[in-house]
């Protein structure tokens, strides 16, 4: 195994067959130091594999060692798991970048995409700007990605469709909850160093933003702050927790002090899941395991 990454989660069903990847869909979620992939058997619509890798520092190379690039990180993963380079029926990649903004369709001009981001972020020369059209939400997601990262993804996955993680998250929530929400509902998607906050009124998404979060207190603070700014009463709000949060966690206990109605996200019943997925919480990896149902 390479010293450039470590495997932090591995759930692979016995029925997964390397020679059958042309009948599989490959879905990846990644940033500069993390990669998670899921494999879907498209005939039975059944998820067969879920693996997560995290970048490590060089540990066995002579000094002065240079930090591993994203290309090094990705190349080493593909060498360790060569079936990821096989031909697949479909390949989609969700990039987890911090520079992103939503623009309503009536206001969107593709020629101004970079300028939209520059209103809130500093865009470096080594970055490029991409867009996703969120048709159900009548919005465009505008985001940046390092050119080197984009080139690596295109080199290793030339047929892949690339989207921003926020696009996958918001569209999958709309698909799964559009007929189940009749009043304001808050969705909290917890990631490693950030969390996403979405409010949906049953007809449309009325609020979306991402916040840095070093711990549970940060998430609780931003949630209460946003609810106060929008004049929403935490006592009446229903919140849905997604991502890296568990029922016995400090975050869950803290949120229950402020929000009366809390539930965890459920798996998409449009898909089947191999028995190894029983060891993974239903709310975990929510965007990734809903990616195949999105029109992106």
Image (cartoon, rainbow, N blue to C red):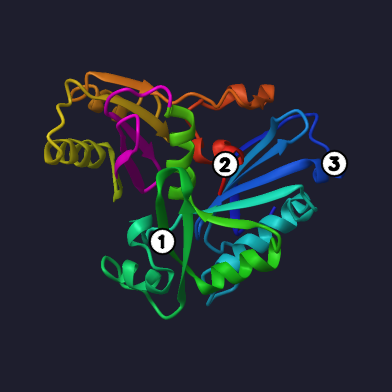
Label 1 packing within 10 angstroms: few (<14), some (14-19), many (20+): many
Give the alpha-carbon distance from disc 3 to disc 1, as whole Å. 35 Å
Comparing marks 3 and 1, which lies closer to the viewer?
1
Marks 3 and 2, the one that precedes in the sequence: 3
Report helix, strand or loop for mark 2: helix
For the magenta stretch, what is the residue range? 179-207
In the picture, the disc for residue 142 is 1
Q: Quadrant of residue 72?
A: bottom right
Asked if residue 11 is positioned above or below residue 80 in the image, the reply reads above
CA neighbours of label 2 inside 10 A, class few (<14), some (14 to 19), many (20+): many
* Relative image position of residue 51 (x, y in whole percent): 63, 41
In the picture of the structure, the residue carrying the numbered disc 3 is 20
Q: Name the residue under label 2.
A: 291
- Secondary structure under tag 3 reads helix
Q: Could you tell me how many numbered marks the image carries?
A: 3
Percent from the top left, x then y, of residue 217?
22, 38
Direction from residue 49 to residue 225 in the image, left or right: left
Give coordinates of residue 193: x percent, y percent: 36, 48
């Amino acid at each position: 195994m390479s010293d450039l990454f470590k495997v932090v989660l591995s759930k692979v069903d016995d029925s997964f067959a390397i020679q059958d990847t042309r009948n599989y869909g490959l879905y990846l979620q990644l940033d500069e130091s993390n990669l998670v992939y899921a494999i879907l058997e498209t005939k039975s619509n059944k998820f067969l594999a879920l693996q997560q890798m995290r970048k490590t520092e060089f540990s066995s190379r002579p000094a002065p060692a240079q930090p591993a690039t994203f290309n090094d990180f990705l190349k080493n993963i593909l060498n360790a798991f060569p079936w990821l380079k096989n031909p697949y029926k479909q390949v989609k990649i969700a990039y987890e970048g911090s520079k992103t903004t939503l623009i309503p369709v009536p206001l969107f001009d593709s020629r101004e995409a970079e300028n939209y981001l520059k209103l809130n972020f500093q865009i470096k020369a080594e970055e490029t700007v991409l867009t996703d059209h969120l048709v159900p939400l009548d919005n465009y997601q505008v985001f940046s990605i390092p050119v080197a990262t984009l080139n690596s993804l295109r080199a290793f996955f030339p047929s892949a469709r690339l989207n921003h993680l926020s696009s996958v998250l918001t569209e999958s929530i709309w698909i799964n909850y559009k007929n189940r929400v009749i009043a304001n509902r808050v969705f909290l998607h917890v990631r490693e160093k950030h969390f996403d906050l979405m409010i949906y009124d049953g007809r449309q998404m009325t609020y979306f933003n991402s916040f840095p979060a070093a711990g549970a207190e940060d998430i609780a603070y931003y949630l209460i702050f946003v609810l106060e700014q929008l004049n929403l009463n935490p006592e009446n709000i229903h919140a849905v927790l997604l991502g890296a949060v568990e029922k016995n966690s400090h975050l869950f206990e803290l949120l229950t002090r402020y929000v009366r109605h809390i539930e965890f996200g459920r798996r998409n019943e449009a898909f089947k899941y191999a028995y190894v997925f029983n060891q993974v919480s239903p709310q975990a990896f929510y965007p990734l395991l809903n990616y195949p149902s999105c029109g992106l």
